[in-house]
Image (cartoon, rainbow, N blue to C red):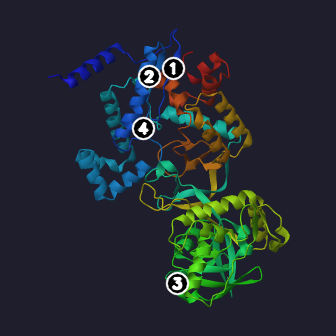
Amino acid sequence: MISWDSIETKWRTKWNQSKEFEIEPDNRPKKFITVAYPYPNSPQHIGHGRTYTLADVHARFLRMKGFNTLFPMGFHYTGTPILGMAKRVQEGERELIENFEKLYHVPPQTIKEFVEPVKIADYFHEEIKHGMIEMGYSIDWRREFTTIDPVYKKFIEWQFRKLKSLNFVIQGSHPVGWCPKDQNPVSQHDTLGDVEPDFTEYILVKFRLDDMIIPTATLRPETIFGVTNLWINPKITYKKVRVNDENWIVSPECAYKLEFLNKSVEVISEVSGAELVGKTVSVLDKKIPMFPASFVESQTGTGIVMSVPAHAPFDYQALIDYQKQNSAINIKPIAIIKTEGLGEIPAKEIVEKLGITNQEDSKLDEATNEVYSKEFYSGVLRENTGKFAGLKVSEAKDTIKTWLSELKNSDILLELNDGPIRCRCGAECVVKLLNNQWFLNYLDKDWKNKTNQCFDKMSILPNEIRTEFNYVVGWLRQRACARQHGLGTKLPWDQNWIVESLSDSVIYMAYYVLAKYVNSSQLKADSLSDEFFEFVFYGIGELKQISIKCNVPE
């Protein structure tokens, strides 16, 4: 019988003894293989096996073709997920501890040490590395590093000072995904299931009920002229809240979200949705009735919906269904948008075309997308929109948003898409308007242009996805680059903040150039200045002077 283990051991030993994969410069053409370094909060799974095996196969293939091929590996310690795990161990969370014991076979004595985040990272770092060695990957382990190594931190400090000098790091107020438990911004890396906490800005249109305000969330403020009624769920217990200097009625979930948006929010009392049904509100000198609707969800928007049945298929069908039950209700849709190829009441036309007969019909999503898309690209506002008549729908949103704000008839609500999204600590995330936060200013047009120019020089395979890269660069906005908790590098000019996990791993592959010399003790963190990194990566400065200043051999 063939002993596969002995064959594997034999060749691993030979490779190790001959230093087969310890790459040095020579006359052969060079290739550098890099693949995302692992986050050591658990052992490798089959996905890791696929990812790193593909890279290893490619590296070996290139060597067979005569290339001097470097394939290094590092470990990404930065971030908060490991902190969350350590906290859960400290709190004695049974499920997590049992996973360590039974699933990952971590010795009980070692688990006790997992109250220290670095102990978790160190343990799984070695576990993952052992697995890579067992797999026979052709990695140059002399270049191994972690993102909390002292010299790597120096590398990141230099990187961020460089970005700040170019005005690419700025400070201000900006919305971010936020964990209310950890009190930290969150990105995809920090959420359960690796969900990116993208969010949407809703316009809150203020309807007035005596001395109260009934805000409704909409993505289409231009449709305010076509509102016929509000939908309110009689089964929801709403909150009367003091928001800054106004009294609002919103769902409990909305009241909670508003607290994170730089608003003073004080709960005054409660009111049932049933009490509000049948009452009349006003907006822009127009009286609007409130009707009951079970489809209104407490966790979405404000828990109250403005109805525009001429242009929103959901609203049209809901109104039809309600009128079937209440024949005395004689409300007709108000058309406010003229679109080539659509009738006067587009929602009615599409609903009938698709054969939709009730609010539960899944084709309502299709109908909504069709109406919204055609109106956005081809629609113009009708004469009954006053001074906005003739304005393209694609331009009307921002114009009317500004107008409503000037009238003090609107506000802003920010909501996460695809919620609920949970932090790795288990808490449900929200959108927070963060003050004095540090951001990478991806809105900078010059930076965007330079990035796209770099893409033009790159080989991207398959070429069909090239446009996706340009698309992402186009929509990228300011992104939080630091947090106040976690493992990682402190911002060099503001020690209260730590560079977050995506921001410290953008150009980490360049560090492999240095890692070999760090591991052989030729580079020491306390002697390295920005001039050292400027010379190594930009060729700026005089070799002899920098060698003396940084105590590094030429």
Badge 2, how many Cα within 10 Å: few under 14, some, many 20+?
Answer: many
Label 2 element class:
helix
Task: Confirm or deny contact between disc 1 and disc 3 (CB under 8 A).
Answer: no
Q: Position of residue 370 (x, y in %)?
A: 63, 60
* Disc with the residue nearer the chain's start (4 vs 2): 4
Question: Which numbered mark, 2 or 3, is in the foreground of this view?
Answer: 3
Question: What is the quadrant of residue 392 in the picture?
Answer: bottom right
Quarter of the picture holding the C terminus: top right
Camera-side residue of 226 and 90: 226
Question: Which numbered mark, 4 or 3, is in the foreground of this view?
Answer: 3
* Disc with the residue nearer the chain's start (1 vs 2): 1
Which residue corresponds to mark 4?
Answer: 38
Q: Position of residue 419 (x, y in %)?
A: 50, 61
Which residue corresponds to mark 1?
Answer: 31
Badge 3, how many Cα within 10 Å: few under 14, some, many 20+?
Answer: some
Which residue corresponds to mark 3?
Answer: 234
- Give me the residue at 61% from left, 25% from top: 537
